[in-house]
Image: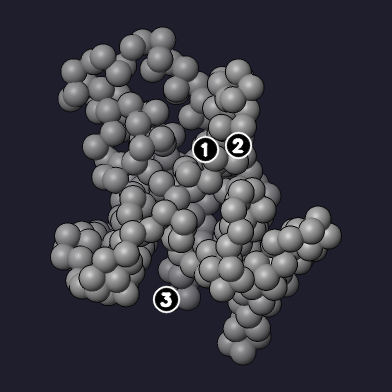
Amino acid sequence: MLLLVLYVGLVYAAALIAALLADGPVWRRTAAVLVVGSALPVPFLAPADFPAFRAFVALGSLWFLARIVELLRQPRHLPAARRAWHVVGLVDTRFVRHMAPGLDRPALIRLLLCAPLVVAGGAGVYFSQLLSGAPRLAVRWSAGALFTYTAVEVVVSAVIVLYGLLGVDPRPLHDDPIRSKTIMEFWSRRWNRAVHRFLKQNIFAPVARRGYTELGMALTFVVSGFIHFAFMLPAVGPGWATMMGAFFLLQLPFLWAERALGVARWRAPLARAWTLTLLFVSSPLFVEPVLQIVDTWSAALG
């Protein structure tokens, strides 16, 4: 356990040092990238029988790298303490709103509603092994989709509740993705707004401003796929990590198809059915790599 804490400490230390360096002359900015980049191999040093921990550390190291990139592209000077908080914080400190500390009841209700669904999804994955063939996969992937979706909702709701108690409103972070009427709406307005903002500002916008909107959109999904590949790689290996990355590449033909079909003009129930069906049918590419980690928990339980 002490060794695992050490790995987390190394990643956080690299992020904080990089944040302090990420200002001023070119050599400091270059050093910031090198320092935060030095944490990327750390997940591979953790024991292989802790894939969830490996994924957590890998995600953290990539998150901190993205935050350093944001700081380096920041046009105005930020104090050292603000830079450090921006890098290791869960939300983008440049956009949060301060308010009177209090309990965010809607977020708490969502957390309490989704937490049992996470358990139900995990139970479905566990008991799917009693089946075989296509029924086993159908139950495993359906339960896995429920587990993954509601787990994200729980994490987002917990972050909102925590920051609300501290007097900070971190929203928007997530906006009922299940209500999306198009694939474009799902990715651009509802799912994981923090990552969307980073990709939009640092990948899509610079390319689109040069007149290459389609290329910017394609690169956005390519980079998103690579990020997910990178943080899953130390946890589940190249095969499963590639599968997860492929999920994001598959969204591009979905987007092109819905644009050609004019899905945005369809009636809401039909458009929502289109969107959720495509996402659900393709979800095993995302869900199965996650379940490879969940399987290690099931094995540990006996």
On residue 203, which mark appears? 2
Count residues near mark 2 (Cα–Cα under 10 Å), then give few for <14, some for 14-19, many for 20+.
many
Residue 270 location in percent, x, y? 21, 21
Among the two numbered marks 2 and 3 on one chain, the one whose residue lies closer to the N terminus:
2
**Kind of residue indicated by mark 1:** Lys
The residue closer to the viewer here, 289 or 38, is: 38
Can you identify the residue that label 3 sits on? 301
Residue extending farthest to the right is 27
Locate residue 223: give its quadrant.
Answer: top right
Locate residue 155: give its quadrant.
Answer: bottom left
When the figure is inspected, residue 224 is found, relative to residue 94, above or below; the finding is: above
When the figure is inspected, residue 267 is found, relative to residue 22, above or below; the finding is: above
On residue 200, which mark appears? 1
**Kind of residue indicated by mark 3:** Leu
Residue depicted at 33% across the width and 26% down the height: 182
Q: What element carries label 1?
A: helix
Q: Distance between the residues labelled 2 and 3?
A: 42 Å
Proximity of marks 3 and 1: CB atoms separated by less than 8 Å: no
Residue depicted at 23% across the width and 70% down the height: 100
Residue 65 location in percent, x, y? 65, 58
Taking the image as drawn, is residue 102 in sight? yes
Q: Distance between the residues labelled 3 and 1?
A: 41 Å
Residue depicted at 24% across the width and 73% down the height: 101
